[in-house]
Amino acid sequence: MTNVLLIGNGAREHAIAEAIMRSTKSPRLYSFMKANNPGIASLSETIRLGRYDNPEEIVAFARENKIDFAVVGPEDPLSHGVVDALSANGIPAVGPTKSPARLETSKSFTRSLLDKYGIAGNPRFRNFKTMDGIEAFLDEIPAIVIKPDGLTGGKGVLVHGDHFQTKKEALAFCRDILTSHAGVTLEEKLDGEEFSLQCLCDGRTVVATPPVQDHKRRFAGDAGPNTGGMGSYSCADHLLPFLKAGDVAAGLEITKKVAAALLEETGQPYKGVMYGGFMTTGNGVRLIEYNARFGDPEAMNILPLLKTDFIEICEHIINGTLERIAIEFEKKATVCIYIVPKGYGLPADYHDAASSSAKIEVGDPGHARLYFASVDQKEDGLYLSASRAIGIVGIADTLDDARTIAEDGIKAVKGPVAFREDIGTDALLQKRIDHMRKIRGKQV
């Protein structure tokens, strides 16, 4: 039997736990969480509640339970060097050590890495540690994106036309960011459609999983503030309606070169998930950012389709032998819709702000799969937090059927919750297709 440590307590980790427990290797799951996720707890031999910024506590839990290897779900433990600490104690992990994990924890590191090693995909950009030179750069490229250097929970990016309109406002944002972050990266604003390409990496071999499209905006029609992601979809042909096969191939090629550059730059092989957020544009595929773990919600689109034994994949990642295993996914469409508190992503004085601490009830989701996210299981029931609560996933032969299954599953959740009604709809997909047709000047 294999003793596996899972670190994390969100819906992404619930999906990882499910993939682990589908293994034919009779695994025993031990989970370290900062809040009690009932879905993960139900699959675990033992759980421990604690902090992700305390690697020693995680190592002690691993040693107590004779862990064979760990899987790190979220970015916080990676940024605090949990993989380094586990490795120092003879416990391998699926997740990069702290130095190559800078791929996510430092926007400036990633942009500079691509630039140094001549890897395609960078937009025009500059990294700044002070305000010196920022105004001049804004004069060169008036339409920009502002990115704080460091972790921001997927919500720190500021985009011209959405978050600010003038150079004066952009300068004020940069000045404010530099009071709390070591640096700020300014990039040209790109025009295109985003897609997520989550890749498995053992330090040298890189394998792509099916592409997914996330929906960051809080409300239908891509309106409202950016969030951690309100839902996502993937298609049965392992493409997306607005993508060409060459777009996915370009994203994979960039990631392969980045993996090689990381090994050269840090001297440490990147072992884990290298998740690229890309944009297909009229001038090719561009990198938006990398994450050093599975996406949330994108993991819920991909892991349920995985046909290959997940523990075997993990072992090959750890051993640096990923080229020896064929990784397969079902040819199914998926739709993931996030249930959130009504006040999620909205100002504190919003009239439904109190929903972030409410009790909810969850019934039978039917054919949908249910993945608990930021909820807390207490003695008297299940409670919301201020973040996303439950991912509801529909899986079917067609996108329409997958969406119907997910929407039916949503009805099982009772309480002060909300969701985006347009994830995976024909109208929203057509909007993406029309956008790319206009950019490319020909049919997608």
Image: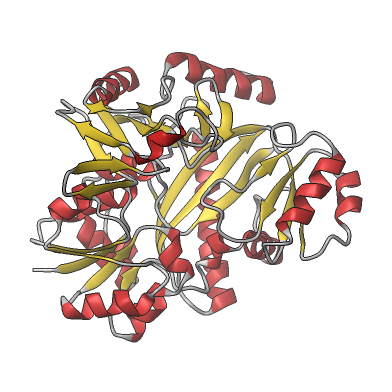
Give the x, y percent position of residue 51. 36, 67
Give the x, y percent position of residue 182. 69, 67
Q: Splitting the image into 4 quarters, where does residue 134 fall?
A: bottom right
Give the x, y percent position of residue 425. 42, 18
Q: Is residue 209 visible?
A: yes
Q: Is residue 395 left or right of residue 188?
A: left
Return the residue nearer the eye: 122 or 165: 165
How is this picture coloured?
secondary structure
> How many labels were placed on the picture?
0
Query: Is the C terminus in the top left, top right, bottom left or bottom right quadrant?
Result: top right
Residue located 32% across and 37% down the image: 358
Image vertical order of residue 112 relative to residue 332, above or below? below
Residue located 41% across and 20% down the image: 421
Query: Is the N terminus in the top left, top right, bottom left or bottom right quadrant?
Result: bottom left
Image vertical order of residue 334 relative to residue 42, above or below? above
Give the x, y percent position of residue 223. 57, 24
Return the residue nearer the eye: 15 or 194: 15
Return the residue nearer the eye: 282 or 100: 100
Residue located 32% across and 31% down the image: 334
Q: Is residue 370 left or right of residue 261?
A: left
Residue located 15% across and 69% down the image: 3
Q: Is residue 321 visible?
A: no
Taking the view exactly as shown, the residue that stands out farthest to the top is 427
Image vertical order of residue 141 relative to residue 186, above or below? above
Image vertical order of residue 94 relative to residue 326, above or below? below
Q: Splitting the image into 4 quarters, where does residue 129 fall?
A: bottom right
